[in-house]
Image (cartoon, grey):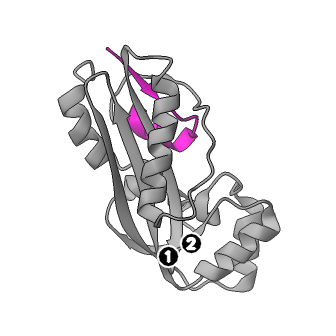
Amino acid sequence: MKLILASTSPRRIELLKNAGFSFDIISPTCDEELDANLNPSKKVENLSFLKAKSVFDLNTDSIVIGADTVVALDNEILGKPKDTLDAIKTLSRLNGKTHFVITGFTVISKDKVITKSVVSKVKFKNLTKKEIENYAKNYNLLDKAGSYAIQDGVVVEGFEGSYSNIVGLPMESLEEILKDVYYGRR
């Protein structure tokens, strides 16, 4: 059975490859609007399901993984920035604070549909205005929830929970599920 990642995120692709999986990549075709009536965990779970299902519906002989990641500060979702100024605004809000990174993921096969979310706690460094501006201008942040990437090693002071979850795919939880549904790995 073929494994498909319903995402073109370079970070998710790298995490899955580094874990030793062979898989195809297909971009999901669903509306990626988050349901405003749900809490952040339910929002990403719902969107991960819609992404996975949009790919599974055309590949019913496969196992499909869908995922969505958000950054939440005081239960408010901080999305991807529109531009560098928006990134600076978001980074300034996160500056010196603790927030949560939540990834919802769904694994769909002909026999199972499993949807979960994983939450990691992230503490931002206290940065100067100049450091925030330099980071926003010198790193590609426009495709990153919360306007940062932990793997850059610039803005995060520390974290609790899954590192790979903060990058975009909670590999520990995902691998546990894939053990049960996917045997053609490594």
Q: How many marks?
A: 2
Closer to the eye: label 2 or 1? 1
Q: Is residue 132 visible?
A: yes
Q: Amino acid at mark 2?
A: Val
Q: Is residue 67 visible?
A: no
83 lies left or right of 165: right
Q: Provide the residue designation for mark 2.
A: 155
SS for tag 1? loop
Q: Provide the residue designation for mark 1.
A: 75
Image quarter of the C terminus:
top left
**Disc 2 residue crowd, few under 14, some 14–19, many 20+, Cα 10 Å:** many
Depth check: 150 or 145 in front? 145
Q: Position of residue 103 (x, y in %)?
A: 43, 55
**Residue 68 to residue 163: above or below:** above
For image coordinates 37% across by 66% down, the residue present is: 120
CA separation in Å, label 2 and label 1:
21 Å
